[in-house]
Amino acid sequence: MSDSPRWLTTTEERAWRGLLRMNDVLVNRTGRSLQGEFGLSGADYTVLAELTRAPGGRLRMVELSRTLAWEKSRLSHHLARMMKRGLVERTECADDRRGAYVTVTLQGREAITAAAPQHVADVRALFLDHLTPGQITLLAEISDLVLEKLSSDD
């Protein structure tokens, strides 16, 4: 016999559903702004942001997949579209024939450099400006904790 589910309380359900809905709305709104003004999808921006933070503007595909929490097939398909647009390039790993690097191109750097100020303004206007500094700190701590717990389960 299995244990009965531990159902969510009204507050827990409100928190969970609110988090999911808020994420969807924020991703859609910031994505529309990026697409409309800069021709970048939200996913393009996310990939470029991770690559430009990395030393030399490159990451192993497996590292990028892990950082983004994307399946390998999703990442491969998305990178193929970005390569066609000249935003990234893929190079084989010399010491591991199965591995590959993804590198941001000059065009990719220019694209994210152009889009970043608007993206930050959108994040502030749509999200951060509605919270107190204490709420932002608490949310950062909650996010870190949950993500840490989830990564230890892998």
Image (spheres, rainbow, N blue to C red):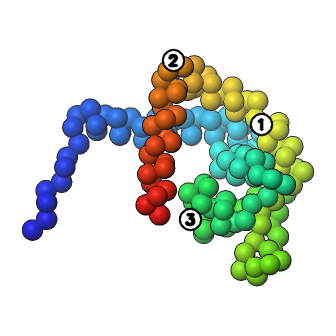
Q: In this view, does 55 lie to the left or right of 68?
A: right
Mark 1 residue type: Ala
Circle 1 residue: 115
Residue drawn at the location 52% of the way across and 34% of the way down: 140
Instruction: Decide which of 107, 138 is in the foreground and name it.
Output: 138
Q: Is residue 120 left or right of residue 20?
A: right
Q: Which of marks 1 and 2 is nearer the N terminus?
A: 1
Per the model, the C-alpha gap separating discs 1 and 3 is 26 Å
Question: x, y (%) of residue 97?
Answer: 76, 82
Neighbour tally class for label 2: few under 14, some 14-19, many 20 plus, Cα within 10 Å: few
Q: Earlier in the sequence, mark 3 or mark 2?
A: 3
Mark 3 residue type: Glu
Name the image quarter holding residue 127.
top right
Numbered mark located on residue 74 in the image: none
Mark 2 residue type: Thr
Which element type, helix, strand or loop, lies under badge 1?
helix
Question: x, y (%) of residue 64?
Answer: 67, 59
Numbered mark located on residue 132 in the image: 2
Instruction: Decide which of 22, 143 is in the foreground and name it.
Output: 143
Circle 3 residue: 71
Q: Please state which of the two labelled residues, at mark 1 or mark 2, is closer to the viewer.
A: 2
Q: Is 5 drawn above or below residue 129 in the view shown?
A: below
